[in-house]
């Protein structure tokens, strides 16, 4: 493979992007070696053990419970037929449309002294110890994460079961295995890699979360980084905590690789076909339908109805002009970040597809690294990098404008958008890469043979064929940026709000009813996006990886 062949525009743009991702992270690594101060010794001695213990406990139990719910639902929906199955099949994805921090405010309000549940018991003269209604605990936090993150495992497991497992499951049935034995001895082993993939996503999301743990008062690494940064004003301690959090992420990713092992189910010699579902009747059908409905009610219907109820109480107080600007901020923010991410994903995806070298694999790996880094860590890395850039470019700023402030980029939206791109590049890239894998190189090579250059081939042949993947990528990135909280809280310019930060501010100020309207707007946009995505998937007859 010649150097000349690799050295082209696709490579240069891909390399530039990868360097932009790497630089902020390396910046915080250098700060670790700075002399520790008294704040760090205080955190290390009195707080760090609790942060570590809470974080590890939270991710372990959440991973276990989301696996149980996600896998069991995927199995029931994929293998059996029962009333309301088709409705439940897609609606069980809806809990993903509610950000966990909004779910935390909602359930916190529902179980509070003035909430619907305690009011119901008092009205009916039913005496229950108030401690049983205290959801703002570690157990309550696990409940929120479990009920609103299990779809990650459900989606991946269901997709695998429907496409890959028909022959094995039917063989098990023919050989006389009971449904339970088939699930234990066939279902779980073949789902191993899918479950691990989903669990890793759940763990990364829990490590990234700030809204739930802050609202419920649970001390984890995310809250510790925010405390060190905002309460103590100590960047060095925040950086040290970020590096420790990255070490936990690194251990999780290594364990993921190790646990996957060499497991691989090949179907090269077997015709892949969908499962022939077993029709359930009587009590079994009732149990299957009830299970799905209960999970859907807890994970989507109840919190949404509660938010509607609170929204109606405050709708007369709404300043529609301020909400218009708030919505515009959110929409424009998410749109710009999405466009940048999808454009870079297309360029890097095309480079990796055309030049299958070790270098292209490294670039691909680094491109998707950002999603494994918690938002608080990315925020610290980006802000320290931008301060360094502003300090170095200050003479240049002065040259063009003698009255300029020193921190030009650091106080702008550019920094926030930059952080979004690092964090969510993997989401956009995975959809695009999947699209490139599906279309292959045949049409591209035919176009080149007929005399069309790479850019024209990319625009006139590849892009039209990638349309479903591009739309999926746009929708998925847009939803994630729309809901993003930790990055936006740290990096937003002064007095700048999005729907997510406004909802968080209201809830944090105990104005839970006022938080309902921006929360509902986020949920409605997310539900609409999920609906459109499902329509696209159905139209092209393909399943898209969420």
Image (cartoon, helix red, strand yellow):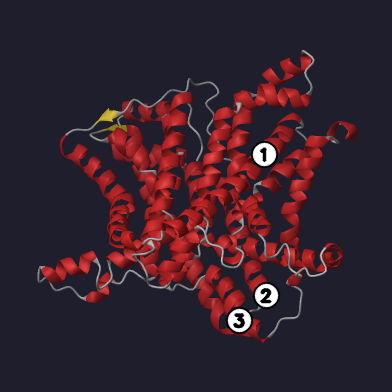
Q: Quadrant of residue 287?
A: top left
Is disc 1 placed on a helix, strand or loop? helix
Residue at the location (58% across, 51% down)? 333
Q: Which mark is residue 263?
A: none
The answer to whether the residue labelled 3 contacts the one labelled 1, judged by CB atoms less than 8 Å apart, is no
Query: Which residue is the site of mark 2?
Result: 235
Q: CA distance from mark 1 to mark 2?
A: 33 Å
Is disc 3 placed on a helix, strand or loop? loop
Q: CA distance from mark 3 to mark 1?
A: 39 Å
Instruction: Assess disc 2: are there few (<14), some (14-19) or many (≥20) residues with their C-alpha within 10 Å of its C-alpha.
Output: some
Instruction: Assess disc 1: are there few (<14), some (14-19) or many (≥20) residues with their C-alpha within 10 Å of its C-alpha.
Output: some
Compared to 285, does 197 lie above or below? below
Compared to 425, does 128 lie above or below? below
Q: Position of residue 360 (x, y in %)?
A: 75, 39
Q: Position of residue 484 (x, y in %)?
A: 52, 56
Query: Which residue is the site of mark 3?
Result: 232
Residue at the location (62% across, 42% down)? 339
Q: Mark 3 vs mark 1: which is more N-terminal?
A: 3
Nearer the observer, disc 3 or disc 1? 1
Q: Quadrant of residue 401?
A: bottom right
Asked if one can make out residue 426 in the rendered structure from this viewpoint, the answer is yes
Left or right: residue 498 versus residue 304 is right
Residue at the location (37% across, 40% down)? 74
Q: Position of residue 225 (x, y in %)?
A: 59, 71
Left or right: residue 272 versus residue 180 is right
Q: CA distance from mark 2 to mark 3?
A: 9 Å
Q: Position of residue 196 (x, y in %)?
A: 50, 47
Q: Which mark is residue 343?
A: 1
The answer to whether the residue labelled 1 contacts the one labelled 2, judged by CB atoms less than 8 Å apart, is no
Is disc 2 placed on a helix, strand or loop? helix
């Amino acid at each position: 493979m010649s150097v000349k062949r690799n050295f082209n525009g696709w490579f240069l743009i891909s390399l530039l992007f990868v360097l932009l991702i790497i630089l902020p992270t390396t910046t915080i690594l250098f700060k670790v070696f700075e002399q520790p101060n008294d704040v760090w010794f205080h955190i290390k001695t009195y707080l760090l053990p609790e942060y570590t213990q809470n974080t590890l406990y939270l991710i372990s139990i959440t991973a276990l419970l989301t696996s149980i719910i996600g896998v069991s639902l995927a199995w029931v929906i994929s293998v059996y037929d029962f009333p309301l199955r088709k409705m439940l099949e897609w609606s069980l994805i809806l809990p993903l449309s509610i950000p966990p921090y909004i779910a935390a405010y909602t359930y916190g309000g529902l179980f509070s002294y003035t909430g619907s549940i305690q009011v119901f018991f008092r009205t009916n003269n039913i005496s229950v110890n108030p401690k049983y209604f205290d959801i703002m605990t570690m157990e309550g936090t696990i409940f929120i994460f479990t009920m609103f993150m299990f779809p990650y495992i459900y989606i991946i497991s269901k997709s695998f079961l429907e496409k890959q497992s028909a022959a094995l499951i039917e063989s098990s049935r023919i050989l006389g295995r009971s449904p339970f034995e088939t699930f234990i001895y066939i279902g779980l082993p073949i789902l191993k890699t899918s479950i691990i993939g989903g669990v890793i996503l759940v763990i990364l999301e829990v490590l990234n979360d700030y809204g739930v743990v802050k609202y419920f008062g649970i001390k984890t690494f995310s809250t510790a980084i925010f405390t060190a940064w905002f309460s103590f004003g100590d960047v060095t301690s925040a950086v040290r905590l970020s590096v420790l959090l990255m070490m936990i992420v690194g251990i999780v990713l290594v364990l993921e690789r190790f646990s996957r092992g060499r497991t691989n189910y090949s179907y090269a010699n077997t015709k892949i076909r969908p499962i022939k579902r077993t029709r359930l009747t009587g009590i079994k059908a009732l149990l299957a339908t009830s299970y799905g409905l209960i999970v859907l009610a807890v994970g989507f219907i109840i919190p949404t109805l509660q938010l509607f109820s609170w929204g109606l109480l405050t709708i007369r107080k709404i300043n529609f002009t301020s909400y218009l600007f708030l919505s515009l901020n959110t929409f424009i923010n998410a749109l710009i970040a999405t466009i940048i991410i999808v454009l870079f994903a297309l360029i890097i995806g095309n480079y990796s597809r055309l030049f299958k070298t070790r270098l292209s694999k490294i670039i691909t790996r680094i491109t998707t690294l950002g999603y494994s880094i918690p938002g608080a860590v990315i925020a610290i890395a980006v802000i320290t990098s931008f301060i360094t850039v502003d300090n170095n470019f200050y003479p240049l700023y002065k040259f063009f404008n003698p009255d300029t402030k020193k921190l030009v980029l650091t106080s702008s939206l550019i920094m926030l958008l930059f952080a979004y791109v690092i964090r969510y590049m993997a989401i956009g890239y995975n959809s695009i890469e999947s699209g490139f894998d599906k279309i292959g190189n045949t049409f591209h090579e035919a176009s080149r043979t007929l005399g069309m250059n790479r850019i024209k081939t990319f625009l006139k042949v590849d892009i039209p064929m990638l349309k479903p993947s591009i739309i999926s990528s746009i929708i998925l990135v847009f939803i994630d940026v729309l809901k993003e909280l930790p990055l936006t809280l740290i990096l937003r310019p002064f007095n700048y709000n999005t729907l997510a930060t406004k909802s968080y501010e209201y809830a944090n100020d105990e104005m839970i009813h006022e938080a309902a309207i921006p929360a509902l707007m986020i949920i409605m946009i997310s539900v609409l996006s999920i609906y459109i995505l499902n329509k696209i998937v159905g139209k092209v007859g393909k399943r898209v990886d969420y």
